[in-house]
Amino acid sequence: MSVEQLFEQLWQDYTQRLCPSALKVQKLLTHKHEQPVNDHIALRTFSGSKLGLAQLAKHFVQLGYQQAGEYHFESKKLLAHHYQHPEPQYPKVFISELCLELCSDNLKDIVGKLIHDLPHQYADDVRFLFQGRPWRISKQEYLSLAQESEYAAWVGAHGFGANHFTVSVNELSGFADLEQVNDFLVWHHFEMNHSGGDIKGSAEVGLQQSSTIADKVSVEFSDGELEIPGGFYEFAKRFPMKNGELYQGFVTASADKIFESTNRGS
Ligand code: NI
């Protein structure tokens, strides 16, 4: 599978299952036949040898990606790495994992049961990255995970797929900055994530980000259906560093708030 094919599969899964509104946003932001440039995508998982960050990352590494940054989110108990490809036109990949060893016994029990029956080689086939949820989960288990960690509940309910795609505002014609993009989307009745301000980050830290609130999508649980937050669409503008090159990393304080785009209360 080529880099292009992998991102195409991830985009199909993301727009069909997790964030159908992204198609509408994309149409509004671009001219006919134009595809916005993706700054990055984000993937989520649970720590551990079976499905941990490294198990997701290895498929990107095989395609030439290299690890570039490491980020810690203490209160959310998350660890993240970002990966870049030597070909700068390929999107960066931001992969996080919930550190299960820092979670309660109740959360560990539920997650342990979810992944218990998966074969140890489950993550060896790259297709798992866009095939959704490979386990059964009840509404009760979902809600119990959500009480402790919105992130755990999200992964428990949706499994694997892109949590968000991110439009590179630097490459977007017709919009000078993130304010214009946000205003335009609000005008078109999209709801933005206000946590940490509508725009997270600044030129000084090299990166500004904003995002929509996650789409509400219908998910089948073992004991019925629930409407819950799915994926969201993000917008990023990068700024030059002292050496003149655009900053390519991520900003922990901003990403911390971006995670909250999938909170149930939002
Ligand atoms: Ni992001």
Image: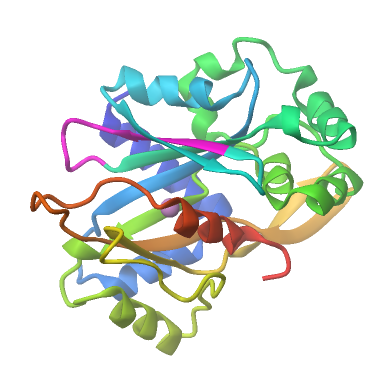
Residue in view at x 79 percent, y 19 percent: 116
Quarter where residue 205 is shown:
bottom left
82 in magenta: yes
Q: Where is residue 115 in the image (x, y as percent from the top left)?
A: 75, 24
Q: Using the image as rendered, state which of residue 40 and residue 67 is in the foreground.
A: 67
Residue in view at x 65 percent, y 20 percent: 48
Q: Where is residue 101 in the image (x, y as percent from the top left)?
A: 74, 27
Left or right of 133 in this view: 169: left
19 w.r.t. 202: above or below: above
Quarter where residue 46 is shown:
top right
Q: In which quarter of the image is the C terminus?
A: bottom right
Question: What coloring was used for the rendering?
Answer: rainbow
Residue in view at x 60 percent, y 16 percent: 122
Q: Using the image as rendered, state which of residue 24 and residue 154 is in the foreground.
A: 154
Left or right of 21 in this view: 51: right
4 in magenta: no
Q: Could you tell me how many numbered marks the image carries?
A: 0
141 w.r.t. 135: above or below: below
Can residue 190 be seen here?
Answer: yes
- Most extreme residue toward the left, as rendered? 244
Q: Using the image as rendered, state which of residue 22 and residue 90 is in the foreground.
A: 90
Q: Position of residue 180 (x, y in %)?
A: 29, 82
228 w.r.t. 88: above or below: below
Can residue 33 be seen here?
Answer: no
32 w.r.t. 249: above or below: below
- Most extreme residue toward the bottom, as rendered? 187
Residue in view at x 88 percent, y 31 percent: 105
Q: Quadrant of the N terminus?
A: top left
Start and end of the magenta stretch? 79-90
Q: Position of residue 192 (x, y in %)?
A: 50, 75
